[in-house]
Amino acid sequence: MVDASIHRMFRGRDLAQKIVQKIKETEVKATIMHVCGTHEQSITRSGLRSLLPDGLEIVPGPGCPVCVTPANEIDAAVKLAENGAIVTVYGDMMRVPGNNGSLLQKKTEGYDCRIVYSPENAIKVARENPTNEVVFFAIGLETTAPMTADILLDSPPENFSVICSHRLTPPAVDFLLSLGETKINGLIEPGHVSTIIGEKAWIPLDEKYHAPQVIAGFEPIDILMAVLMIARQIKNNKGCLENEYTRSVSYEGNIKAQTTLNEVFKIKDEIWRGFPTIPESTYEIKKEYQQYDAIKKYDIQMQEQGENCGVDCPLCGKILRGLAKPQDCHKFKKECIPTNPLGACMVSTEGTCNIAYRYGGIIKL
């Protein structure tokens, strides 16, 4: 259990005010992007945007793994459920609409779709149902991918397979910067992802763009310190990689997890929701473990995919790229609410629209 004094230290009002004053003293005007749903929760819930000086903005990017999973991968899971497989998935993904509905809709129609809390839970379902095909819809960024890789190394049952929808964060950030759609002056890089991939994974972006980057933790003080570090870099006309989250993130990262990932997965080009194809941005199961790749096992033909969340969500792609905010959507807080989400950004508790609905606050673009 984390000591309560640690929480107080990273949420203290007096310390926050001192950091905010230091930020104001830089007199920097800039747009800073983060790519982490947990960062967005902390920023919005704590009202951090209201503390920042005019002209210094934090905008969310594609940091919610549920939100960036494209509709055609959901469609594949739906098709397998319709074909009689037991489809298991993490909770929020159950409600995300694809082109042919969500897994929750299929569940209400009588198909066997189940929420699990880990890949091990999905394996348990497969062992308890040996006459049924069981598919685990594996989503997430580098943080959850090692768990999926680990179960494939542990000789899962023959009736078990995986839709691999794990994605890599640095290639998405690289792609965003190369698009140049949003003027991004600095980046707050995700802490949880970085505990796996390490500081070293962000160095190629540093060498390519020389943009201010700070790996940050998730408490309000962590995020304010990251903003201060970025503002000082901009003030000094200096762009480099810094690590605010040194209590959890090392230079090398989690070597054991990286080894597991490299053994089971290869990397391929793939679309993300809201984006065209991003080079080298998705994990794919290697040939040695192909018998557990549900797409190949059942010869699922993946459909072409556009940028939107779903049929009724016109702005999702722009929200994920930092080009629009939830309040720009005329359906936000009206037809589109957490109990009736029209797109992934309202479904997930890490989605920008869901967070804006629950905690309020205005994102300026």
Image (cartoon, helix red, strand yellow):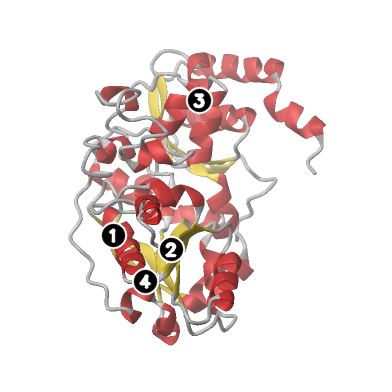
- State yes or no: discs 1 and 4 in contact (Cβ < 8 Å): no
Q: Which residue is mark 3?
A: 44
On residue 179, the disc is: none
* Residue 126 sits in quarter: bottom right
Numbered disc 1: secondary structure = helix
Callout count: 4
Whole-percent x, y for residue 232 in the image? 51, 27
Whole-percent x, y for residue 224 in the image? 57, 27
For the residues labelled 3 and 1, the Cα–Cα distance comes to 32 Å
**Viewer-nearest residue: 195 or 317:** 317
Q: Residue at x 63, y 51 (%)?
A: 249
Q: Quadrant of the N terminus?
A: top right
Residue at the far front: name it: 110
On residue 84, the disc is: 4
For the residues labelled 4 and 2, the Cα–Cα distance comes to 8 Å
Q: Residue at x 54, y 56 (%)?
A: 143
Whole-percent x, y for residue 241 in the image? 50, 45
Q: Which residue is mark 2?
A: 112
**Viewer-nearest residue: 77 or 1:** 77
Mark 3 or mark 4, whichever is nearer to me: 4
Numbered disc 3: secondary structure = helix
Q: Which residue is mark 1?
A: 75
Instruction: Confirm whether residue 266 shows in the render.
Output: yes
Whole-percent x, y for residue 141 in the image? 47, 56
- State yes or no: discs 4 and 2 in contact (Cβ < 8 Å): no
The disc labelled 3 sits on which kind of residue?
A: Thr
Q: Residue at x 38, y 43 (%)?
A: 62
